[in-house]
Amino acid sequence: MIALLTHPGSPDALEELRELQSDAIAIGKQLLVLSATSEDDLESAFASMAQHRVRVLLIGQDPFLFQAGGQLVALAAKHRIPAIYGNSELAAAGALISYGASVPDAWRLAGNYAGRILKGAHPANLPVVQPTKFDLVINLNTAKALGLMIPPTLLARADEVIE
């Protein structure tokens, strides 16, 4: 079983859910959807995952879940649930895998925008840009602690491997 932990107030929650439900069906897996709006919800969500014998957890993209990253990493380790996050900082903190927009690239884009504004560009006239660079980070220490073997082909694709 695959679990998705989401924040119901997130503007991306419904789209994430639709895509993951479709993907889970395509690979013949069940998707357990859990929502959290507070730190207490996180504890009960992980207890529910343990009861349902979740094999992997996907963390939704939301500021609340991003802020709770340290607690999520600790709970995933405590319950021995492999988890995939959207921000690379959490892989360094003990997350198994992170895959998401490159933080350095986002800062570079922000700097470019700030420079354009300081040179007189009106913010409303600047184009909206989407991330184009994504980073895959794998923490082999966490994989070892969970008794998981990461396929060499996945390791070869990683932008960073933490050993």
Image: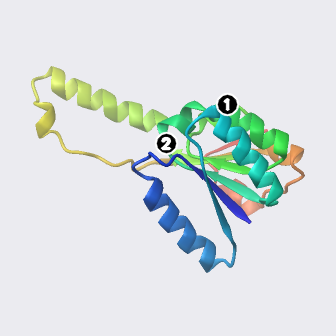
Residue 135 visible, this angle: no
Decide which of 34, 123 is in the foreground and name it.
34
The residue most toward the top is 118
Q: Which residue is mark 1?
A: 70
- Taking the spot 40% from the left edge, 36% from the top edge, the residue there is 106
Decide which of 46, 131 is in the foreground and name it.
46
Report the side of 12 relative to 100 (left or right). left
Quarter of the image for the N terminus: give it: bottom right
Q: Earlier in the sequence, mark 1 or mark 2?
A: 2
| Residue 57 vertical position relative to residue 101 in the rendered view, above or below | below
Residue 100: give x, y in percent of width and height.
Answer: 52, 47
The answer to whether marks 1 and 2 mark residues whose Cβ atoms lie closer than 8 Å is no
Residue 123: give x, y in percent of width and height.
Answer: 15, 32
- Taking the spot 48% from the left edge, 67% from the top edge, the residue there is 18
Residue 4: give x, y in percent of width and height.
Answer: 62, 56
Report the side of 155 relative to 24 (left or right). right
Amino acid type, callout 1: Gly
Q: Which residue is mark 2?
A: 62
Marks 1/2: CA–CA distance = 14 Å
Decide which of 36, 11 is in the foreground and name it.
36
Q: Secondary structure at mark 2?
A: loop
